Amino acid sequence: MTKIRMNTELRNKLFNKIKNVFENEDTQERENFLSARESVDYHYDIAHKLAREVVERSYPPEDVSVLRSFKKKYGSPCDVVAKDKCFYFAHSEDKDEDGDIKETKSHFDFGLFGNLNGSEYDSEEGKKFAFAYYREDLKAMDCNPDIFAQQNENKDNPHKTKHVDECTKALGKSGSSYHSNDSDTGMTKTFNDQYYLDVIGTSYCRSRAIACNKDEYEAFETWRIAKGNVVSKHQTWIDTIQKQCDQLKIGLKAYRYLSEGIELATELGIQLDEAELIRTNSTGLTIYNPSNLASMIKGMKNKNQSREAKILARKQYEESLN
C-alpha cells in the first residue's frame, strides 16, 4: 500500500479526533468542573429563595398588588412596580476602624450573564460563566465556549471577538447594553425568567439598596462565589487540554506520514482507522493514489462521444444499479 503523506487536512482531522478524546476523558480537572457546575444550581436555588424573602420584606406582595391595581386604574403615573433579577443588598452590622457602624452593600445579579464582582455592569466574568454553564449546548451549535479559557493570556483580538460574539448570540443575549434584558431570547431568557422578583421603584437597582442582615448577605456572597468557582474550574480544566494540544500540534506538524499520526494515537490509547481517515478526506485518495488521480483527471476532459459510446455508457450505468 502506498505510504500516505501528511497534509493540512489530515493533520486537522487527527488533531480534532485526538482533542475530542482529551475533552471527554474522565480526569480530575474535568470532574471538578462538572461538580462546580452542578453545585451552582444548588446555590442558585438557595440564594434565590432567600432573595425572595428579603425583597418581599421590603416590598410586601400586598403593596405590590395595590400599586398594580392603581396602575390599572390611573395609568402611567402609578407605574412603579417592575420585575427585576438584580438587586443591591446591604447590611449595617459591621464597624469601621473608628468603631462606627458602616454599610456593607453589593450588587447581586441572578441573570445568566450577571457579574461576579459586584458591579452592576456587564463584564467578561459574566460571559465566562454563561459559556461554561451551557458549554455542551454551545458545542452542539458549533460554537467555542472555551474561547475565554483558551485566550486567557491574550488581549482582545479578532479571533477571540468572533467566537465570543457567536456564543453570545447563540445563547440569545441581546445587544451589549447591560439593561437590555427585554430583548433576550433562547437560553438566556429561559434562564433569567426563573429569577425575576417584584420591586417597587422607577430607577435602576443601584438607587434602591435593599436591607438584609449579615448572615443573609454572606449567603448571597457564597452563591456568587459558587458562580466564580464554575469559571475557575473550567479554566483549570481547559488549561490542561491546551497544554496537551500544544504538544500535539508540534508533533503532528513534524510528522511526514499519516502512519506516524496513527501510531501516536495508538500510544495515547486512541484507536483510529487509517482507512476511515483517508476515506473521509476530500483529497487523500486522489492525490496519493496514481490510478485514482489519473481517473479523476481523465474525467475532467470534455471528450466527444459517439452515439454508440453514449448508449454503451448508459447501459453500463443501468446495469450497475441492479
Image (tube, helix red, strand yellow):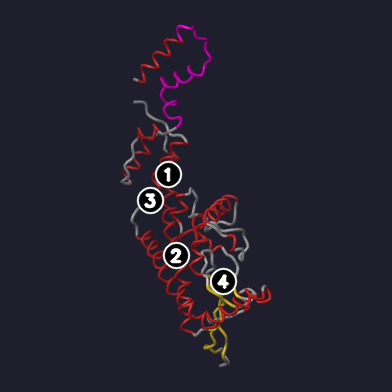
Which mark is on residue 230? 2
Q: Position of residue 7 (x, y in %)?
A: 46, 34
Inter-mark Cα distance, 2 to 4: 27 Å
Q: Looking at the picture, which amino acid does disc 3 mark?
A: Phe
**69 above or below 289?**
below
Mark 2 surroundings within 10 Å by alpha-carbon count, few (fewer than 14), some (14 through 19), many (20 or more):
many
Residue underneath mark 4: 83
Mark 4 or mark 1: whose residue is earlier in sequence: 1
Furthest-bottom residue in view? Answer: 99
Q: Is residue 20 left or right of residue 111?
A: left
Q: Looking at the picture, which amino acid does disc 1 mark?
A: Asn
Span highlighted in magenta in the image: 282-309
Mark 3 or mark 2: whose residue is earlier in sequence: 3
Main SS class of the magenta portion in the image = helix
Q: Say if mark 3 contacts mark 2, CB within 8 Å.
A: no
**16 above or below 203?**
above
Mark 4 or mark 3: whose residue is earlier in sequence: 3
Residue underneath mark 1: 16
Which mark is on residue 22? 3
Inter-mark Cα distance, 3 to 2: 20 Å
Inter-mark Cα distance, 3 to 1: 10 Å
Inter-mark Cα distance, 1 to 2: 25 Å
| Residue 305 sits inside the magenta stretch | yes
> At x 37% / y 64%, what residue is drawn?
35
> At x 48% / y 48%, what residue is drawn?
142
Mark 2 or mark 4: whose residue is earlier in sequence: 4
